[in-house]
């Protein structure tokens, strides 16, 4: 395995995204002394504790003071180090939003933020620990790169890739045992380049995070039951977004539906809609995610089903979108 990793893709089925992140960060840290870690009394929960145990002189616990932690990270980055900051997504993007914006993004510093418990993955913890606004907040910050990996294997690839990627990076991962989408690491991961997970010509499902696997399963189900050809795109990088992948979907399937574990405003769906609108091309389009509300409290799997971002919900939404009417002709001029 690259970077001297001690786990394999088979271990990904028994490790959380955060577990794999912790392992990968340790492996990278062995070869790159610039890597340092920070947390705010959540090292064990976010799994950066593995790095802290291995490199105690390169780890800093700021205590329950997230604003101070991001200020510290900015200072470390200014001195030539590459800080990896780990805390829950809700604390990163809201409690410390000003420090992330002004201390880190404004100066375009090489701070890599790995935010755990994103979306409604910590569903039973309640609204204060849900984070369905983070993608919208981080996308709006200049210089920030925004990544939402589909599984632990993609998390490993993204962590490695972001080390040499210039500027601040925000990566959101879940809490629990998110199932694997990929069977191997070497599938050509690149920041800013989407991955086609399932070919299709009737409709395109553009997804990120936990919805990618659910959409793949939905695509296989719809092929068998409805004869539908569903393209599934893993848009792991929301900023910079892969415009080419979106526009190819517009031209080749004429129907697009997005799925995300995030509020329907400002996240993946909004990012895709911006590309579609700026192209001047028309298509049937829908955004599926958490509606304009604070999520219910419950186990993540139940919440994913309620908000129709699990396989059953995706199947239902794709069938609905297939029923939408639009101009089938190839004359784009009357649709600009």
Image: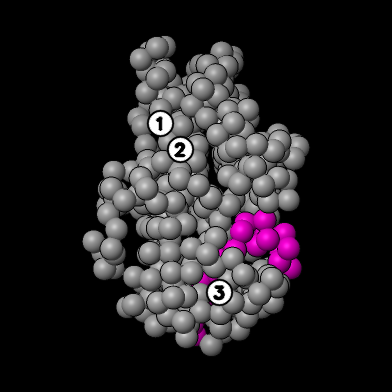
Label 3, on which residue? Answer: 38
- Who's the residue at 52% across and 64% down the image? 44
Picture coordinates of residue 93, whole percent (x, y): 67, 59
Image coords of residue 134 (percent x, y): 65, 52
The question of residue 332 being in magenta is answered with: no
Please name which of the two marks, 2 or 3, marks the residue nearer to the observer. 3
Q: What is the number of the mark on residue 212?
A: 2
| Outermost residue, bottom side | 79
Q: Residues within 10 Å of mark 2 (few under 14, many from 20)?
A: many
Please give the name of the residue rendered at 34% of the width and 70% of the height, measured from the top-left corner.
27
Q: Report helix, strand or loop for mark 1.
A: helix
**Which residue occupies the foreground of this view, 155 or 48?**
48
Front position in the image: 108 or 8: 8
Query: Residue at image x 40%, y 20%?
Result: 221
Nearer to us in this view, 151 or 286: 151
Task: Using the numbered discs, state the Cα–Cα distance from disc 2 to disc 1 in whole angstroms.
Answer: 6 Å
Question: Does the CB distance between marks 2 and 3 fall below 8 Å?
Answer: no
| Quarter the N terminus occupies | bottom left
Residue 89 is inside the magenta segment: yes
The label shown at residue 58 is none
Colour style of the rendered protein structure: one colour
For label 3, the crowd category at 10 Å Cα-Cα, with few meaning under 14, some 14 to 19 and many 20 or more, is: many
Q: Position of residue 300 (x, y in %)?
A: 58, 38
> In whole angstroms, how far apart are the C-alphas of marks 3 and 1?
35 Å
Q: Is residue 109 at least partly visible in the picture?
A: no
**Disc marking residue 216:** 1
Task: Please report whichever mark, 2 or 3, sits nearer to the chain's N-terminal start.
Answer: 3
Q: Which residues are magenta?
A: 80-99
Q: Secondary structure at mark 2?
A: helix
């Amino acid at each position: 395995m690259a970077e001297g990793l001690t786990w394999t893709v088979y271990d990904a089925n028994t490790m959380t995204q955060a577990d794999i992140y912790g392992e990968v960060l340790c492996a990278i840290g062995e070869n790159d002394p610039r890597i340092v870690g920070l947390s705010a009394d959540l090292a064990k929960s976010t799994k950066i504790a593995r790095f802290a145990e291995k490199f105690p002189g390169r780890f800093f616990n700021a205590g329950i003071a997230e604003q101070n932690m991001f200020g510290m990270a900015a200072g470390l980055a200014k001195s030539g180090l590459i800080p990896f900051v780990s805390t829950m997504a809700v604390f990163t993007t809201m409690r410390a939003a000003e420090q992330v914006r002004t201390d880190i993004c404004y100066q375009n510093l090489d701070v890599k933020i790995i935010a755990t418990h994103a979306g409604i993955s910590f569903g039973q913890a309640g609204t204060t620990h849900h984070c369905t606004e983070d993608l919208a907040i981080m996308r709006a910050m200049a210089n920030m790169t925004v990544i939402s990996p589909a599984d632990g294997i993609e998390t490993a690839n993204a962590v490695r890739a972001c080390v040499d990627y210039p500027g601040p990076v925000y990566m959101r991962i879940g809490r629990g045992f998110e199932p694997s989408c990929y069977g191997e690491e070497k599938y050509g991961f690149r920041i800013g380049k989407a991955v086609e997970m399932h070919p299709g010509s009737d409709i395109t499902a553009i997804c990120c995070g936990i919805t990618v696997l659910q959409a793949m399963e939905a695509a296989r189900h719809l092929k068998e039951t409805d004869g539908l050809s569903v393209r599934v795109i893993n848009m792991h990088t929301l900023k910079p977004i892969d415009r080419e992948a979106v526009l190819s979907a517009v031209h080749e399937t004429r129907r697009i539906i997005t799925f995300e574990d995030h509020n329907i405003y400002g996240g993946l769906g909004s990012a895709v809609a911006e590309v579609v609108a700026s192209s001047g091309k028309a298509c049937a389009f829908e955004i599926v995610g958490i509606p304009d509300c604070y999520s219910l409290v419950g186990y993540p799997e139940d919440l994913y089903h309620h908000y129709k971002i699990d396989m059953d919900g995706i199947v239902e939404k794709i069938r609905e979108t297939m029923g939408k009417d639009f101009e089938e002709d190839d004359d784009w001029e009357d649709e600009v």
